[in-house]
Amino acid sequence: MNTRETLKINERGHLELGGKDCVELAAEFGTPLYAFDEAYIRKMMRIYKNTLDRVYEGRGMVLYASKAFSCKAIYRIADEENIGVDVVSGGELYTALSVGFPAERIYMHGNNKLDYEIGEALDAKIGCIVADACSEIDKIDAEAKKRGMVQNILLRINPGVEAHTHAFVQTATTDSKFGFSISDGTAEKVTAYALSKKNISLQGYHCHIGSQIFEKDSFALAAEKCMDFAAKMRETLNFTVKTLNLGGGFGVWYTDEDRKLPAEAYAEYLEALVAAVKEKATQKGLPLPFLLVEPGRSIVGEAGITLYTVGAIKDIPGVKKYVAVDGGMFDNPRYALYESKYTAVLANRADERPTEVVTIAGKCCESGDLIAVNVNLPKASSGDILAVLSTGAYNYSMAMNYNRNKIPPCVLVNEGKAEYIVKPQSYEDLTRNDVVPQRLTKK
Ligand code: LLP
């Protein structure tokens, strides 16, 4: 097993997360359960913030990409750590504001922001909206005018960098639905268009090349392309970029096929980005822009695990062995979507060596409802507690109620103690919005 500082095997042979025995966690809170190590989340936030402050002399800000994991507590932690957040919907914005997250440190993304979302962002006076369509520029301008204000915006540009990741999470290729392409001249035209608007103030650009990327060079290349474009815009439109947001996307460990980076190694990604920005600024005679980065997965991904109870086990001789758990694609749809790989551990027998290769199946009525395929495990029995590692990002945030399964609760572990940050759903929660028209009521 790949143990991180957040995970260890204790003297009882149990898996421990952030100093809390996972078998106890399962007994106290039930399964399925998402558990997060607060210390690891804070550590990652600090590594990014301190590195940016150090190598870029405090002229930047780290934004936590809250799509990776959004709930009230995570915005409180980000606020306490003095970083900003990226939100991508009215719902994420509402959640952040509901716990007093400072609006000026909120950046709003999305390739098709709805009218009411733009209105809500303006009413809250958030720091910046990242526009990703001309129609959005029009709407932001019109809504800002109505309110007698000028809204700071960035334009999402597409540097055309191919990164090695799953096609669905690659975002800055020329055919992407995201961003205005630099290479075909669209980004320049849209810059001129945005500059012509009175109630928006164009601050600069944003790009995000994709997710789960380990190649430092891809990030540096994207930074260089954005700076080259900034230099061109100064020449052709006399527009000087004040802010550059280089997105997130830094990869994390899921299985031993991935690179296993100590938390501190993530500083190197920022160092590479900053070096590329500084070098280009000097080369092109540009002032250094205010620099933003938006890590999501690398802040929460390895901080989280999911605990399940093993139920039915089905051995199809000569074919495969299914170990079914009390969760499934409703709490982790990533195998169904991307054939994602995970490492699983029997939390109550974490000191035992794996003896077989199995497929972890969920409980949904769907053949593709698998959590992980071909994982190494000791021979599992019904009742064992199974931990799936590195589920902190894009699991709870992508969970759903398929088959009317309840989305599992989340607990935060801090100094060996755990408490809810998202409570369990009830059957009432599942039916809360259901309406039976009068004519269908049972007579
Ligand atoms: N900034 C923007 C504009 C983004 O679109 C994203 C992720 C991030 C930052 C954060 O990227 P991260 O550091 O988390 O890689 N559901 C997929 C991942 C989708 C990522 C979407 N955008 C998955 O489960 O792998």
Image: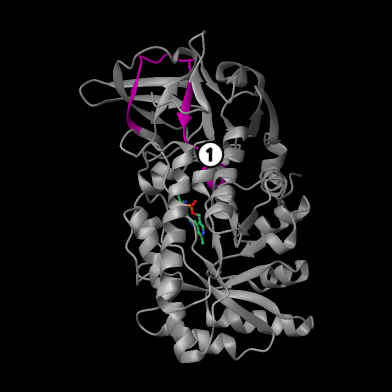
Which residue is denoted by mark 1 in the rendering? 392
In the image, residue 344 lies at what x, y percent?
A: 41, 27
Q: Is any atom of residue 394 visible in this view? A: no
In the image, residue 300 lies at what x, y percent?
A: 55, 42
Identify the amino acid type marked 1: Gly
> Within the image, what quadrant is residue 360 found in?
top left
- Name the residue rendered at 61%, 39% in the picture: 42
Judged left or right of residue 309, residue 75 is right
Residue that extends furthest to the left in the rendered view of this protein = 318
In the image, residue 14 lies at what x, y percent?
A: 50, 14
Q: Secondary structure at mark 1?
A: loop
> Within the image, what quadrant is residue 378 found in?
top left
Residue that extends furthest to the top in the rendered view of this protein = 12
Q: Note whether 253 is above or below 273 in the view shown.
A: above
Q: Considering depth in this image, is 131 or 437 the residue closer to the camera?
A: 131
In the image, residue 68 lies in the stretch drawn in magenta: no
In the image, residue 396 lies in the stretch drawn in magenta: yes
**Could you tell me how many numbered marks the image carries?**
1
Badge 1, how many Cα within 10 Å: few under 14, some, many 20+?
Answer: many
Q: Quadrant of the C terminus?
A: top right
- Name the residue rendered at 55%, 70% in the picture: 289
Q: Note whether 71 is above or below 123 in the view shown.
A: above
Q: Note whether 296 is above or below 33 in the view shown.
A: below
Q: Is mark 1 within 8 Å of ligand 1?
A: no
Q: Quadrant of the N terminus?
A: top left
- Color encoding of the figure: one colour
Question: Which residues make up the magenta segment?
Answer: 373-399
Q: Is any atom of residue 266 visible in this view? A: yes
> Within the image, what quadrant is residue 138 found in?
bottom right
In the image, residue 180 lies at what x, y percent?
A: 45, 77
Q: Considering depth in this image, is 253 or 285 the residue closer to the camera?
A: 285
- Name the residue rendered at 50%, 41% in the picture: 301
